[in-house]
Image: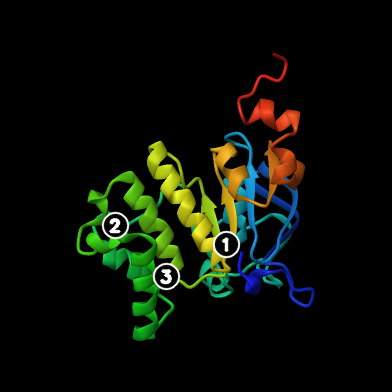
Amino acid sequence: MSSDALPNAASPPALELSGVRVAYGGIAACKDISLTVERGEIVTLIGANGAGKTSVLKSIVQLVPHAGGTVRVFGTDVKGLPTHRVVALGAALVPEGRAIFGNLSVRENLLLGAFRNRDASSIAKHLARSVELFPRLGERMDQNAGTLSGGEQQMLAIARALMANPKLILLDEPSLGLAPKLVAQIFESIVEIASSGITILLVEQNTRLALEIAQRAYVLVTGEVVLSGACADLKTDPRIREAYLGENIQA
């Protein structure tokens, strides 16, 4: 974590959710979610499929407006804002499934991430940063994104988010469908991104890895936070070990 990323008492947290509720057609996906992510932290949301983790991320960038409660991004209440305005506040979502544009080149996908930026030198700087972080993308700039491997597509999705010069990145299942070697590479890149001072909220199915790189975690069960704390403590909690780390503590 960089010294610039340390929490400042005079500055609001990167992210605050208070009593947030999300519903789809009257069916509650999130119930009274409250959490805080300080500037420069990696915080992870863990829970089974259907626990409401993706709904939390979508509510932050207003892809799914929350039905109740408050979401603040760097101190600004985002309720009712269009997604591009939330991006302008400094938040970027890397969605589950990557959502890259397969018929466009790697370069074109990256440039779409910089849609708010009109400064050619700044765009070039961010492109160079993407290649430095993910050298494979530099080798495939003019290749159609749809021909990339799954791991390369995930690299592209993360790099595209970085092109918006975010202060907060929301990562939804970055290891999904990837081979273990590629998962390790992706997680190394996440740690490197965080070390530059960017705040990260991570939703990840690989609980063990998520708890290794994050400082704090929130555990969601059927749309509610049931447990939270420092990852160092949660890794030794019998409930986490049995439910999410595959350890039979009765043995």
Residue 152, position as x, y percentages in the image: 32, 51
**Residue identified by numbered label 1:** 61
> Residue shown at 33%/45% (left/top)?
150
The answer to whether any part of residue 177 appears in the image is no
| Mark 3 touches mark 2? (CB < 8 Å) | no
| Nearest to N terminus: mark 1 or mark 3 | 1
Secondary structure beneath label 1 = loop
Residue 126 sits above or below residue 168 on the image = below
Sequence-earlier tag: 2 or 1: 1
Image vertical order of residue 221 relative to residue 144, above or below: above
Query: From the image, which quarter does the N terminus lie in?
Result: bottom right
Query: Along the horizontal axis of the image, is 101 left or right of 20?
Result: left
Q: Are marks 1 and 3 in contact (CB under 8 Å)?
A: no
Q: Quadrant of residue 211?
A: top right
Q: Amino acid at mark 1?
A: Val
Circle 3 SS class: loop
Label 2: how many residues lie within 10 Å, few (<14), some (14-19) or many (20+)?
some
**Which residue is tagged 2?**
136
User: Residue at horizontal 72%, vertical 34%?
Assistant: 236
Residue plotted at (63% across, 31% down): 244
Which residue is labeled 3 in the image?
A: 163
Q: Inspect the image, locate mark 3, and give the three-letter code of the amino acid beneath it.
A: Met
If the image is split into quadrants, where does the C terminus sit? top right
Q: Is residue 189 above or below residue 150?
A: below
* Residue 89 in picture, x, y percent from top left: 59, 74
- For the residue pair 135 and 45, the one nearer the viewer reads as 135
Upstream in sequence: badge 3 or badge 2: 2
Q: Amino acid at mark 2?
A: Arg
| Residue 138 falls left or right of residue 250 | left
The nearer-to-camera label among 1 and 3 is 3
C-alpha distance separating marks 3 and 2: 16 Å
